[in-house]
């Protein structure tokens, strides 16, 4: 592993521990040349997922795009960065476990919405408004009404 400080390739592992719910290994290292300490993560190499865009273009799956969208949707809510990372990890794991290695953006967007629906309604509406390209108040009302039956069922189960 190359040291980020001096680019020397000789380092020793100080500590190893499981990360990302066992899906990766976090290693704390020390450069043998300059004593700089740094952290590396080791993950299982997987077959890349190709994302089919609405325009018909294809690109490799990029988790940072989902994180960026979730950060915007979850701004000023109680959803923190750790929870966002967990959501993206879950989605990425589901995609890698699937048989198909080409997925449409629609499927990924719906996966995100499924997670947000259970966590925070405001973040759900924000993400849906961008993802589904809301054009006016009627789009918001329709989406809010689709959430309403869930609340009535939850309320009835408490009584």
Image (cartoon, rainbow, N blue to C red):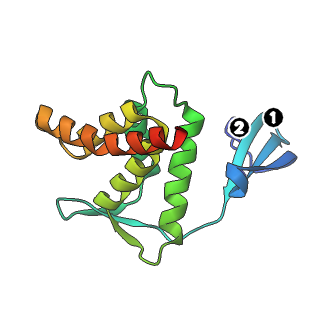
Residue 104: mark: none
Q: Residue at x 58, y 46 (%)?
A: 86
Q: Which class describes the residues within 10 Å of circle 2: few (<14), some (14-19), or many (20+)? A: few
Q: Is residue 93 above or below residue 119?
A: below
Q: Residue at x 56, y 52 (%)?
A: 89
Residue 126 place in picture, x, y as percent: 31, 34
Q: Residue at x 67, y 50 (%)?
A: 20
| In-image side of 27 versus 4 (left or right) | right
Residue 54 place in picture, x, y as percent: 20, 59
Q: Which class describes the residues within 10 Å of circle 1: few (<14), some (14-19), or many (20+)? A: few
Residue 2 seen in the current view: no
In the rendered structure, are the residues bearing label 2 and label 1 in contact, judged by CB atoms less than 8 Å apart? yes
Q: Marks 2/1: CA distance?
A: 7 Å
Compare residues 125 and 59 and report the one nearer the observer: 125
Residue that label 2 marks: 6
Residue 34: mark: 1
């Amino acid at each position: 592993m190359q040291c980020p400080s001096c680019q020397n390739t000789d380092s020793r592992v100080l500590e190893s521990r499981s990360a990302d719910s066992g899906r990766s290994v976090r290693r704390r290292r020390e450069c043998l040349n300059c004593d700089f300490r740094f952290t590396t993560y080791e993950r299982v190499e997987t077959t890349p997922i190709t994302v089919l865009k609405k325009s018909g273009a294809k690109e490799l799956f990029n988790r940072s795009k989902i994180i960026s969208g979730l950060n915007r949707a979850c701004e000023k809510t109680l959803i923190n960065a750790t929870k966002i990372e967990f959501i993206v990890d879950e989605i990425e794991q589901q995609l890698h476990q699937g048989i198909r290695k080409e997925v449409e953006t629609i499927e990924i967007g719906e996966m995100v919405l499924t997670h947000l629906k259970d966590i925070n309604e405001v973040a759900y509406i924000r993400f849906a408004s961008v993802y589904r390209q809301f054009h006016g108040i009627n789009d918001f009302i329709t989406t809010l009404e689709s959430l309403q039956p869930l609340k009535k069922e939850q309320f009835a189960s408490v009584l």
